[in-house]
Image (spheres, helix red, strand yellow):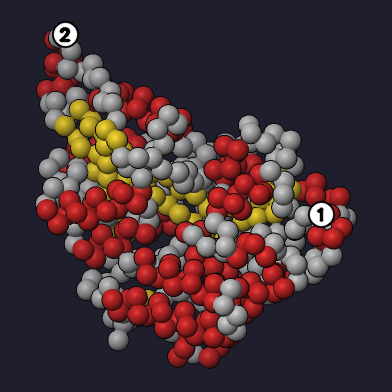
Amino acid sequence: MKKVMASVLALTMAVSLAACGSSPEKTQEPKSEAASTSGQGQQDTAKKGEGQTIEVWTQWTAGSDKETYSLEMIKKFEEETGYKVNCTNFTYDMLHEKVLTAAAGGNVPDCAWGLPEYIGEFYNMGILEDLTDEFNAWDEKDVFSESVVKAMSMDGQVVAMPYEMSVRAFLVHEGDFEAAGMEVPATWEDLLNMEGYYDAQGKYPFEITGSGVRAAQELLVYLAQSGVEIATLQEDGLYKNTWNENPDQLDKAAKVFQFYKDLIDKGIVNPSARNWTWEETDENLCTGLVSSHVSGNWLRNKESQNPETMKDMGAYAIPYPEGSKPYTYMECKPMFVFKDSKNKEGAVELMKAIAGKEWQEKVWAYGSPRSDVYSESIWSKGFSDIGAEGISFPGVTLAGVTQAMNDSIAKVLQEGKTPQEAAAWLSDAVNASLSDTGELSK
């Protein structure tokens, strides 16, 4: 097993997330004008891409601005380089499974988009190309912070290129708290002292995500705020959850589950949130049914549908325990080249174009990993100004780990387990998952 890198990262820029998918589809290929009948067009093609095809697997929603602008930029890339770009679009789940199948058969694309949780898994499978030399030779590499580069790296190798980034913020209807005569809560203790809020205002002051992909992300942040990691890098280069070996760590983890329990028991959070995914919680926040929630700046896409209820939205640091410091979840999305890719040179050129300033300003103005791409809105500058440290999952295979995290929340909020029992169970479950994938330190 290769050594993997810890993923506690410093947040330095504004970010966003576009977390929607589409059915697998062959995207209409933009018509290249570089290989036109003109002598100049033929000369450019010969000098650059020579008409070679770059096979790329993408993720965007059909008909979305991301698709429209991406196809425009792909056409421009073709015209300028002479490459032909052939896109096939998937949901992230389908893309992940397709990569696994293609890697087993030696029939991978030249480039594929992905999620950060794929990096450790694909790297440990030995299927990713080392992009360190290409990245270091790129004259735009300095616009990416150290945290972004680390997020794209394993064992000191750059194994992916970033194309989109997001963090979470504590999004607040400021008018609600003004009407209640209360300050925006900054700490866990502030939240838990709002027991009379629902009776006075007719809505809950806060919300949690009880299930689904975002539940584990929220839990990861609260654990970091309490001073513990879900899995810690060991001297042998593998990972282990050490809570059950360290009573102080177990107590800190248990305090997080006590926080979840208290939010429900004290009426700070709707009891139905035990089962809610991000779809319900985001909708509740945007329509004004709840006063605050931790989410991302993709919610800007909801403003046109909810202009009145979202006009008082503010972005703050996620509440944290007194004596701790604010953390947030950072998600930096990668693009991969595979060891078996047929057109690695073309794939690298395409990835540099996608991560370039012009492309980023066109497609990801609110969610760029580049420090020189941002806007003055709450959804960009507002998120960068929260002053929280960004964290991410460790570079391991995450499916079993995140499922165990979700199950641990359910054990407290639905099954009646004590916070201490849930923390001890989660420690064992994480290590069982790491053992199954060969990533557990002995």
Locate the N terminus and report the quarter of the image it occupies.
Answer: bottom left
Q: Position of residue 437 (x, y in %)?
A: 27, 73
In this view, the residue in front, 204 or 375, is 204
Q: Amino acid at mark 1?
A: Gly
Up the image or down, 38 lies above or below 234; here it is: above
- Pick the quarter of the image with the C terminus: bottom left
Of labels 2 and 1, earlier in sequence is 2
Q: Do we see residue 168 in this rendering?
A: yes
Q: Which mark is residue 38?
A: 2
Q: Is residue 235 above or below residue 77?
A: below
Q: Residue at x 81, y 54 (%)?
A: 202
Single out the residue that lies furthest toward the top.
38
Picture disc at residue 202: 1
Q: Amino acid at mark 2?
A: Ser
Q: Is residue 2 left or right of residue 400?
A: left
Find numbered disc 1 in the image and state the secondary structure of the residue it sits on: loop
